[in-house]
Amino acid sequence: MSKGKKIAQYTILTIVSLFSVFPLYYMLCGATNKSTDVVTGRLIPGTYLLKNFQNLIANQNLGRALWNSFRNAVILTALALLVCSIAGYGFEIFHDKGKDVVMTILLMAMMIPFAAIMIPLFRMFAQMKLVNTMAAFMLPTISTPFLIMLFRQSARSFPHDIIEAARMDGLSEIGIFFRMFIPTMRSTYAAAMTITFMNAWNNYLWPKVVLQNDSSITMPMLVSNLQGGYKTDYGVLMLGVFICTIPTAIVFFCLQKSFTEGITGSVK
């Protein structure tokens, strides 16, 4: 590649990067400024961060929202990884005439929007008396067609010769899965964990419907409440959005390399 093409390439990448980072910078500036400064579009960090934080914790139960979101996201992520990885492994390793039909039905379910099944789901959980419980929050998303497909595609690269050798040595199917498959597919688990944690943390619609107690508030619900009333403090709102963004950003940046390897490996 010539020097001119490299300069043009890096220039374009720099411009695109600036456009991508600008919303984060604007959010950070808004979190440190007064509401009037945010409305006027001030792009210089201010000195109202502590005041905005005091107003946030005074009007909203920030600690409970953070704990609920973190607890729900961690438990849901762990359960989803276990269930979906076992399903994807089974779909690929074990041969059955009907598994392709079942997988086709699962993939077809990806085309149904959640809003179309939200009311039937709520009625079902209400009849089971599971409203305002963690089970109602987690059960609809513990197993997703996308994660099952992701693990199934990754299982295709898992050497079948190793499985046969392990079976001949007397290792059980459970042992093969936990002692051989999981360590080998670490990048796929990292990618699935990133996706599941971010979706669970940012989920707003279903928790808003099924978790009706104030004690069950999550961070997306808290941020939504900051916009209520006759007047919105945009400085406090920007701070709430910034705090809500931090955990998912940390997870993504820590697992960025593994996430890329996992997504790429599942497509091959």
Image (cartoon, rainbow, N blue to C red):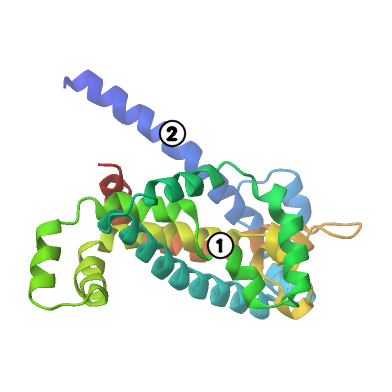
Q: How far apart are marks 2 and 1 (CA)?
A: 34 Å
Answer left or right for 140 relative to 17.
Answer: right
246 or 69: nearer the viewer: 69
Q: Is residue 16 above or below residue 105?
A: above
**Residue type beneath disc 1:** Thr
Q: What element carries label 2?
A: helix
Mark with earlier residue (2, 1): 2
Q: Which residue is drawn at 64% across and 69% down?
A: 137
Answer left or right for 123 relative to 76.
Answer: right
Q: Residue at x 65, y 80 (%)?
A: 63
Residue count near mark 2 (Cα–Cα under 10 Å), binned few <14, some 14–19, many ≥20: few
Residue where numbered disc 1 is placed: 141
Q: Residue at x 14, y 56 (%)?
A: 159
Labelled disc at residue 245: none
Residue where numbered disc 2 is placed: 16
**Residue type beneath disc 2:** Val
- Whole-percent x, y for residue 100 in the image: 38, 46
